[in-house]
Image: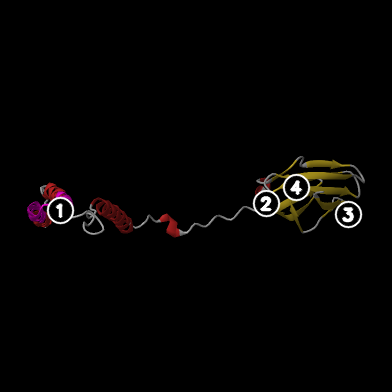
Amino acid sequence: MSDTLAVAINRTHLHSVESPDGFETTGSFDIELANHGEAVHVHVHLDDALSEVASVEAINHHLRPGATRRVPVAVHDDEHSVSGRLKLAAAYGAETRFVDLSLRAVRPTKPPVEVDSALDKPANRGSRSRLGSSSRSGSGSSRSSGSSRSPEPSGPGGVLSAGALGDSDGIGTPAAALGVAVLLLAIIAVATIDSPLLLLGAVAVLAGALVAGYVSLR
């Protein structure tokens, strides 16, 4: 239900206009013209400030004796509060009255969003360059560390050295195998020959085989 601005016509004297000095409302409202005397013509007018946000459907009204008429005032812009003056004139200006009219905003405008001034400034070039160089150097160091792996140590826990199996050219290994074979043959001969002379020769061969094996393993 809209608010109502009550206006009395011809109540105190002929062509008199009575209304509040001021009227405040939100959105559209009605002007109620109540005629308490003879037939009269009433003029309704909004000043320039009010006309920008509101309008009256009809500005001239003829009231019969004792008649009451409601005049709608439509508010088109209810997002801004506006103040102005409403003019009421009876009998073609025989008597005029002004009402201070205030139209309050229904949906106040949202306050502007404040943006931090630091967000408008570009990032420090020096910081970006330092970050870029550090990232490049870090990636380069990781690549270099991955590519330059040290060779696994050789020795007791790793690859056997060449001296343990013989010379690096592989000559000592057959000699050691030959010495072991001769040693086995000599042991068999000692165990099976009954002749002292042959046994002495076998012992000599066995001693030579031991010496040859020892030399080949050094």
160 with respect to 60 (left or right): left
Which numbered marker is on residue 107?
Answer: 2
Q: Dot 3, how many residues are within 10 Å of its Cα: few (below 14), some (14-19), or many (20+)?
A: few
Query: What residue is disc 4 on?
Result: 28
Amino acid type at mark 2: Arg
Of 106 and 141, nearer the camera is: 141
Magenta-drawn stretch contains 194: yes
Where residue 26 appears, x then y in whole percent? 74, 52
- For the magenta stretch, what is the residue range? 183-206
Distance of label 2 from label 1 (alpha carbons) = 124 Å
Q: In the image, which disc is placed on residue 190?
A: 1
Whole-Å distance between the Cαs marked 4 and 1? Answer: 136 Å
Q: Amino acid at mark 4?
A: Ser
Q: Earlier in the sequence, mark 2 or mark 1?
A: 2
Mark 1: which secondary structure?
Answer: helix
Tell me the mark number nearer the camera, choosing from 3 and 1: 1
Residue lying furthest front in this view?
195
